[in-house]
Image: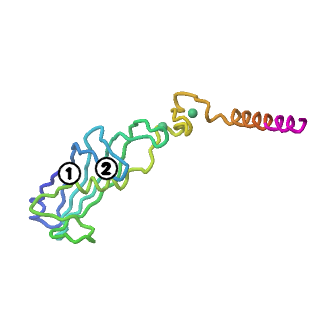
Amino acid sequence: MRLDISRLLKEPGSSMPFEFRETLENLNLGGERMDFDEPVHVQGVCQYTGKSFLTEGSIKARYTATCSRCTADMHASLDIPFQAVYTRGARDEGSESYPLEGNVIELTSAVADELLLNIPMRHLCSPDCQGLCPVCGADRNRTQCGCGDRNEYDDSFARLLKITGESEGTDKEE
Ligand SMILES: [Zn+2]
Ligand SMILES: [Zn+2]
């Protein structure tokens, strides 16, 4: 996503629109991964203030994620606002600006930063996803394994108590 700013440099205060549809390499942040389903769409306007270049616009991305409950692959999308400032010689760590060299703005790293900042911590394949059974690991959206059936558990526990009680009773009789 390279933006040629030669024209803007001639005239402080001027601006120009930009639009990119570009395939980004898959991004990784901690355990969260972002595998894009299609080229990322970025559009906006770049303005030259005379000192810095201010880019503003939006990012649209569709990607494949993993459901936090059932671990199935699912499709998700982000449509987020985007803003980045490019300043010549901005190299210090604390700077909010991205560095600028030559007459080209490379938007890709700012776009990637923005996407990673906005990716949800949890994805759900559907709002009522039943998740995996904590006992046997079965996908509860597809099968009813029965492990989670609380009544069944209570029944068997009650039966166990009853058996223990009976055996105690038998002991006393002997
Ligand atoms: Zn799910
Ligand atoms: Zn189960």
Q: Position of residue 15 (x, y in %)?
A: 19, 59
Real-space Cα distance between discs 2 and 1? Answer: 26 Å
Decide if residue 83 is on the left or right side of residue 171.
left
Q: Position of residue 162 (x, y in %)?
A: 80, 35
Q: Say which mark, if any, is on residue 28.
A: 2
Q: Is disc 2 placed on a helix, strand or loop? A: strand
Tag 2: residue type? Asn
Q: Is residue 172 covered in magenta?
A: yes
Q: Name the residue that disc number 1 marks.
A: 18
Q: Are marks 2 and 1 in contact (CB under 8 Å)?
A: no
Q: Position of residue 109 (x, y in %)?
A: 23, 55
The residue sitting at the top extreme is: 143
Secondary structure predominantly adopted by residues drawn in magenta: helix
Q: Is disc 1 placed on a helix, strand or loop? A: strand
Decide if residue 162 is on the left or right side of residue 11.
right
Q: Is residue 86 covered in magenta?
A: no
Which image quadrant is residue 88 in?
Answer: bottom left
What range is drawn magenta here? 164-174
Decide if residue 7 is on the left or right side of residue 112.
left
Q: Residue at x 20, y 62 (%)?
A: 47
> Tag 2: Cα neighbours inside 10 Å, few (<14), some, or many (≥20)?
few
Q: Quadrant of the C terminus?
A: top right
